Amino acid sequence: MEIWKLSILFLSAFLGGAAIFLVKSDKSQLLKLILSFSGAYLFAITVLHLIPDAYHGTDHEDIGIFILIGFLLQVFLEQFSEGVEHGHIHKHNENRVFPFGIMISLCLHAFLEGMPLAKDQHNALIFGISLHHIPAAFALGSILMQNHIKKGNIIFYISLFALMAPLGFFVSYSISNGSIGGIENYFNRIMGIVIGIFLHISTTILFESSVDHKVTKRKMIAVLCGIGIALIGYFSSSHAH
């Protein structure tokens, strides 16, 4: 298992969340561009790599069902996370109320997102997921700050969120290598669920990045860059084979 992948996953989310103490504005244009880029990149990687890999092999007839389950699971999680994984920042109560629903659903989401990295042979996913977690962690930090959570506790909860994707990577790595007895037979189905989550997240980001179905030039460039980089990785890996 590559330690550098675990480090990038943790640091991107941790630093993204910790940036809330440095950036006072809720409407950072840079974060929005990162979100648009990562959404397009994740969508392209899902279509080019994850879906073909999930259907590769002998036992793949029911993968589509698990993709639908993953899609619906993300719809369910967002009832509690309030779209924080898309970088959404909502105003919350002035009282000291901890947003348990947001924290739990966001951690589960990040854990599941880390799972495909066990099959990320060409390092196509690691950077997309890491970039995607920067605005999500920033939004989480903002919500915790709005709820008047103490600074030390905010850092703790951001660290907990940042650990989830590396933990998902570690668990899926153990499953795919047969370290966890018998579960490796279901790895492609687990990936189907993750694919459904990725499809929901990436398409929601792309749809929500436009106002009145119009996308600014900067966001269009960010989206095209995300898809372009994914395509470059796809064609270079194809030639390698």
Image (cartoon, grey):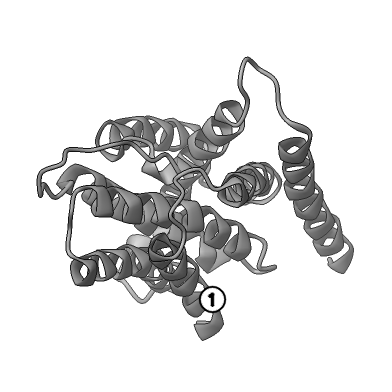
Quadrant for residue 73, please give it.
Answer: top left
The residue most toward the right is 239
The residue most toward the left is 96
Tell me the crowding category of disc 1: few under 14, some 14 to 19, or many 20 or more residues within 10 angstroms, Cα based.
some
Q: Residue at x 71, y 46 (%)?
A: 48
Q: Position of residue 184 (x, y in %)?
A: 40, 63
- Closer to us: 173 or 84: 84
Q: Position of residue 22 (x, y in %)?
A: 44, 65
Q: Position of residue 150 (x, y in %)?
A: 17, 64
- What amino acid type should be assigned to the residue bearing mark 1? Lys
Tell me if I can see residue 201 in this picture.
yes
Q: Give the secondary structure at mark 1.
A: helix
**96 in relation to 215, above or below:** below
- Closer to us: 38 or 216: 216
Image quadrant in which the C terminus is located? bottom right
The residue most toward the front is 24
| Residue 66 appears left or right of 94 | right
Q: Which residue is mark 1?
A: 5
- Closer to us: 45 or 184: 45
- Closer to us: 45 or 40: 40
Quadrant for residue 128, please give it.
Answer: bottom right
Q: Residue at x 43, y 72 (%)?
A: 10
Q: Position of residue 16 (x, y in %)?
A: 46, 63
**216 in relation to 171, above or below:** above
Q: Residue at x 63, y 26 (%)?
A: 210
Tell me if I can see residue 55 in this picture.
no
